[in-house]
Image (cartoon, helix red, strand yellow):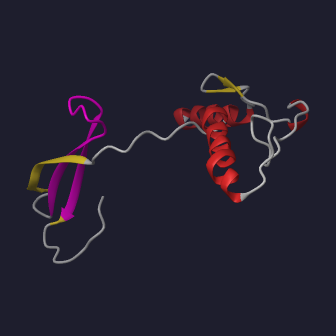
Amino acid sequence: MLTACLLFITTINAFAQKQDTIAGIPVNYDESKTGSWELPDLFTLQSGSRVTNAKDWMEQRRPEIARLFASEQFGKSPRRIPRQANLFDAGSPALEGKALRKQVRLYFTDDTARHQADMVIYLPAEATGPVPLF
């Protein structure tokens, strides 16, 4: 009972405190503290020239805006790598014979010695069609 009370108090306290940083990065919850700023004109190139046609937009301004989002806001998506997986347990009995356990090793980079995760899949032993995984 004491443990439950302490856990409850700790949880309430954690949510009641406003965080000034998240993962070490300062955060601001007050819009009035952002300062004054203007969004860049969508039809003005970084060189100062105006976009006057669709070709200029598609070949120049649109890529400029995408680069701004990548460098200032969202970052760049990592390149896609081929999905790699290794089934190292094709189906051994589990849960007193009620299930089959399959184990798969997933690789997240080209270097299969690093950045990997093992996934365990339990399937009903008597299943004849699609079933949920857990």
User: Is 129 on the left or on the right of 52, as rendered?
Assistant: left
- The stretch in magenta equals 99-123
Farthest bottom residue in view = 128
Magenta region includes residue 115: yes
In the rendered image of this protein, does residue 101 appear above or below residue 131?
A: above
* Occupied quadrant, residue 71: top right
Relative image position of residue 60 (x, y in whole percent):
66, 45
Q: Position of residue 38 (x, y in %)?
A: 87, 38
Instruction: Give the image location of residue 126, x and y in percent.
Output: 13, 73
Q: Nearer the viewer, residue 61 or 127?
A: 61
The image quadrant of residue 27 is top right
* Residue at the image point whose x is 30% and y is 58% from the top: 134
Q: Nearer the viewer, residue 47 or 101?
A: 47
Q: Which residue is located at x 69 percent, y 46 percent?
A: 61
In the image, 27: left or right of 82? right
User: Is residue 10 rendered magenta in the image?
Assistant: no
